[in-house]
Image (cartoon, rainbow, N blue to C red):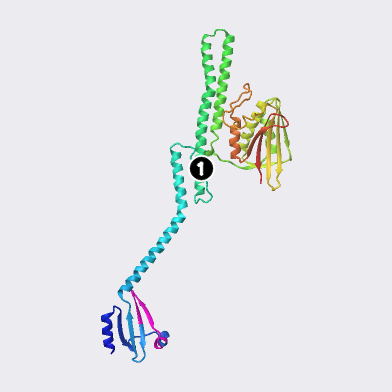
Amino acid sequence: HREEFVSHWLEKSNVDLTIQDRSAFPVPGDIEEGFKNGTPLLLESEGEFSFHFYMRTTDQVMSMTLPIQQRVTHSFLNVILTLLFYLVVVMVLLVWLYPLINRLVMLQKAANHLGKGDLSSRVSASKFSYISSIENDFNRMANQIQKLVDDNKLLSRAVSHNLKTPITRLRMGVDVLDEATDKSDLDKYLKRINYDLDEMESLVDTLLQYSSLDEFKLRLNYEAVDLCQFIPNLIENGNTTSVDITSHFSEDSIVVNTDPRYLAMCLANILSNAIRHANGMVEVTVKHIVRESNQSEVLLTIEDDGCGISKKDKPFVTKPFWRGSSDPAIKGHGMGLAIVARIAEWLKADLAISSSASLGGASISLLFRVS
């Protein structure tokens, strides 16, 4: 009673059940034999599953289709799994992006503080940062801004201080000239006025030289420079005094790769300082050094027999307009070693300031790395 069974089944169950002849149910040839031997067949169509069983005694096929409620449950499960997948992806992205977002927030805060006038604002260095190059560029920019502001403050204070005295003397000299009648007095006061004008002109020239050392406009032209020829020419052209300058070279030819224009400016300032403070002797020594690690270096040292640089002044002698406790009778504005320090930094040479063991005065050294 198959028809009664099917009718009763459909009344009691929500699973569709049909029975049809085997001839009305085509099966692919590769699975037909297994199907006829009793292996159930599971088919998946769009949105549903169906089970098919072969009944050998009647040569019929009984088919059962899963109810729509189970199909909905299956779709809901797909949605849940899909949402879980995307949630995991988002969490992984957040874990990966959090350090970047954190560093960007720190960079933003540092930039805001710098923009509000806090020139000490910096980004703490981290080797695990994704934007370490940007952070280093920001710190370099902040250092340069602070350096420029400090230089401007220092120059403004120094200029006002250094110009005040000669201007006062000039005013007094002009007032005295109005009252002077004797020619000898006129000549004396005119000589003083010319001296003050020369001093002011020297100060202005020094300021212009220092301000021209602008790192943003810097263009270094590196070339091979033989110090054994370069330094004697520099001494011959630059020494117009009675100070005895001697040179010593460890080899006949010592070559460094540098910018000859800025090297000449740097050495000229060191020699000028040495000649100004020397009692009568300046010594230039150039050595070619090869370290145990095969690192080749050139050490250039300029020494004098003057009073030297005191220990308390050494940390400050490379600052503009710092003259320290040197003899006030020695003319100068305290800019020579400030220029030397800036150029040495550009030329990637290590500057060292100490006392001369042989002459007793100051010793200024530049260390160049050759290879």
Q: Position of residue 41 (x, y in %)?
A: 38, 82
Q: Nearer the viewer, residue 322 or 239?
A: 322
Q: Residue at x 46, y 37 (%)?
A: 118
Q: Is residue 224 visible?
A: no
Q: What's the residue type where badge 1 is placed?
A: Asn
Q: Position of residue 147 (x, y in %)?
A: 52, 36
| Displayed quadrant of residue 334 | top right
The image shows residue 261, relative to residue 179, as above or below, that is below
Residue 251 within the segment the image draws in magenta: no
Q: Residue at x 71, y 39 (%)?
A: 287
Residue carrying label 1: 139
Q: Position of residue 231 (x, y in %)?
A: 68, 35
Q: Residue at x 59, y 36 (%)?
A: 343
Q: Nearer the viewer, residue 199 or 234?
A: 199
Residue 39 within the segment the image draws in magenta: yes
The image shows residue 325, relative to residue 138, as above or below, that is above
State left or right for residue 113 relative to residue 210. Answer: left
The image shows residue 5, relative to residue 281, as above or below, that is below
In the image, which residues are magenta? 34-51
Q: Position of residue 289 (x, y in %)?
A: 71, 42
State left or right for residue 229 relative to residue 210. Answer: right
Mark 1 neighbour class, 10 Å CA radius: few under 14, some 14 to 19, many 20 or more: many
Q: Residue at x 44, y 57 (%)?
A: 93
| Displayed quadrant of residue 222 | top right
Count of labels shown?
Answer: 1
